[in-house]
Image (cartoon, rainbow, N blue to C red):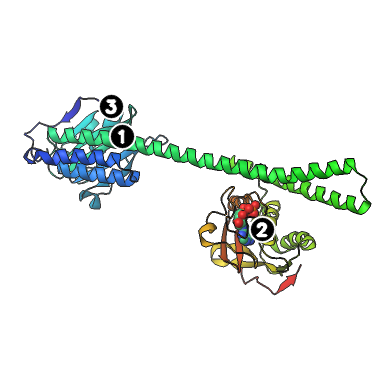
């Protein structure tokens, strides 16, 4: 930081700080060090540091602003002091300068305003935010200025050189605090990515290895032996099932890839949910040992969505309903209109294991599989619900779940209705698919 200060107004004898006991300042410095050493949240630590600095220099307000690289603005990060109630901290844009913020930021200089009622930097009028005098200091991290610290007082010429010195230490401590926060965030991001990669590797290797083992094993058996037609047909059927499973996993990985890269292509058009749901259910009804019902779709308003993606969403939800509920139990697809929000809600309910409360928020995350005892043996890559959520949200909708342990789950998706004038209730007596 530049030692040179942009002094404004005439220098008077230091007032407030000179009469304060020296221990007050020493205590403030000790508190700065303690806050830096503690591992509190960034926001809380900054607030506490600002409060300590404000009290030590007897300021009426103190605000830390951070430079936004995109807009170039100085955005309030945290503040303290009684003056903030009537004058909440504002974003400072170039060309405006509360207490010389832009000046201090751009030049890396300390700006001391002894009488804010007497004009402004560059002849421009500024909002004084209830202050008559102020000190603004650049806040730096790793030798770059990243923000400014402004202390203000209702009194003119309030800040003596000793107060400015203490604020300089406060600004340096805040810079260090922000740097620690940045490093912590980097570590968190790294840990998050490492966890995702570990999850991906363990799930991908397990999920890919199982079908591969079946494919290699049965194809070798077919090449080696002379099994009967019945046995051969069983083996072909295993090979077929596992090849499909492999294709599904690879498709899911590709979907997640394009979702993450923001390359999802949607063809939005009016979609009739009833017929579409019945078509999807028909595929399941043939193979699964479950009773699957679809509510009559006659009165279901059309939604604006991509029909292929809605099909995929319903497939994933039904696939889960089948996987996580006992054979012979009932699965239902129903529809409901949400007139107030112009949406149509489709729900898939089952009578299965349910999802424990603590797991519910996680199941929509990528590679997150339920860890509760009755589902860990079921195969899956932990991608289905992540894809459901991403697709529904990309179509302007919402997804949520209700669940009761050992009673079942209801997954609901809301999609925008095609027509604004939707009326009535589309829930009808269940029909067997
Ligand atoms: P996968 O089924 O491949 O594990 P999903 O993303 O589809 O991945 O689901 C994530 C987790 O949510 C599952 O591992 C399971 O624990 C839980 N889950 C999903 N659907 C249901 C359901 N209908 N009933 C109970 N648990 C479910």
Residue at 63% x, 58% y: name it.
375
Quadrant containing ligand 1 reads: bottom right
Residue 33 is tagged as none
What is the total number of numbered labels drawn onto the structure image?
3
* For the residues bearing labels 2 and 3, Cβ distance under 8 angstroms: no
Closer-to-camera residue (20/231): 231
Q: Is residue 147 visible?
A: no
Residue 433 in the image: state x and y as whole percent: 76, 67
Between tags 3 and 1, which lies in front?
Answer: 1
Q: Which residue is mark 3?
A: 107
Q: Kindly identify which residue carries mark 1.
A: 176
In the image, is 98 to the left or to the right of 306?
Answer: left
Q: Is residue 249 visible?
A: yes
Mark 1 Cα shell of 10 Å, populated few (<14), some (14-19), many (≥20): some
Going by the picture, which residue comes out furthest to the front?
A: 225
Q: Is residue 393 above or below residue 199?
A: below
Viewer-side residue, 28 vs 297: 28
In the rendered view, does 184 fall on the left or right side of 322?
left
Image mark for residue 320: 2
Residues under labels 3 and 1: Cα distance?
Answer: 20 Å
Q: Residues within 10 Å of mark 3 (few under 14, many from 20)?
A: some
| Residue at 80 percent of width and 62 percent of height | 286
Q: Position of residue 377 (x, y in %)?
A: 65, 55
The quarter holding residue 362 reads bottom right
Q: In percent of the image, x 28 and y 37: which residue is there? A: 174
Q: Residue furthest bottom?
A: 429
Some atom of ligand 1 lies within 8 Å of the CB belonging to the residue at label 2: yes
Is residue 236 found left or right of 121 in the rendered image? Answer: right
Disc nearer the start of the sequence (3/1): 3
Mark sitting earlier along the chain (2/3): 3
- The yes-or-no answer for disc 1 within 8 Å of ligand 1 is no
The residue nearer to you, when weighing 142 against 107, is: 142
């Amino acid at each position: 930081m530049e030692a040179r200060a942009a002094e404004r107004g005439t220098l008077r004898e230091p007032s407030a700080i000179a009469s304060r006991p020296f221990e007050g300042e020493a205590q403030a410095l000790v508190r700065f060090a303690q806050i830096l050493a503690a591992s509190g949240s960034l926001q809380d630590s900054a607030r506490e540091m600002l409060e300590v600095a404000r009290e030590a220099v007897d300021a009426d307000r103190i605000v830390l602003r951070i430079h936004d690289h995109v807009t170039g603005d100085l955005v309030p990060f945290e503040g303290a002091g009684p003056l903030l109630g009537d004058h909440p901290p504002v974003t400072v844009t170039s060309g405006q300068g509360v207490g010389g913020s832009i000046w201090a930021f751009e030049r890396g200089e300390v700006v001391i305003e002894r009488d804010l009622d007497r004009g402004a930097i560059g002849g421009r009028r500024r909002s004084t935010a209830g202050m008559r005098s102020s000190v603004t200091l650049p806040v730096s991290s790793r030798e770059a200025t990243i923000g400014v610290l402004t202390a203000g007082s209702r009194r003119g010429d309030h800040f003596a050189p000793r107060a400015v010195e203490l604020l300089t230490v406060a600004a340096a401590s805040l810079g260090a605090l922000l740097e620690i926060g940045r490093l912590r965030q980097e570590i968190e991001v790294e840990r998050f990515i490492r966890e995702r990669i570990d999850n991906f590797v363990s799930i991908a290797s397990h999920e890919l290895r199982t079908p591969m083992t079946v494919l290699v094993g049965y194809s070798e058996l077919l090449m080696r032996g002379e099994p009967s037609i019945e046995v051969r047909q069983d083996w072909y059927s295993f090979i077929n099932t596992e090849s499909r499973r492999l294709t599904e996993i690879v498709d899911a990985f590709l979907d997640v890839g394009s979702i993450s890269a923001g390359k999802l292509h949607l063809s939005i058009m009016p979609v009739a949910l009833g017929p579409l749901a019945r078509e999807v259910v028909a595929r399941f009804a043939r193979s699964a040992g479950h009773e699957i019902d679809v509510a009559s779709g006659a009165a279901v308003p059309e939604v604006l969505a991509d029909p292929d993606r809605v099909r995929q969403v319903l497939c994933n939800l039904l696939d889960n309903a089948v996987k996580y509920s006992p054979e012979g139990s009932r699965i239902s697809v129903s529809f409901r209109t949400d007139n107030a929000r112009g949406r149509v809600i489709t729900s898939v309910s089952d009578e299965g294991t349910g999802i424990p409360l603590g797991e519910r928020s996680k199941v929509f995350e990528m590679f997150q599989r339920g860890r509760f005892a009755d589902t860990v043996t079921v195969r899956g890559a932990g991608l289905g619900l992540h894809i459901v959520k991403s697709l529904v949200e990309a179509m302007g909708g919402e997804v949520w779940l209700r669940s009761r342990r050992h009673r079942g789950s209801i997954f609901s998706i809301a999609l925008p209705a095609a027509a604004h004038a939707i009326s009535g209730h589309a829930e009808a007596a269940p029909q067997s698919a």
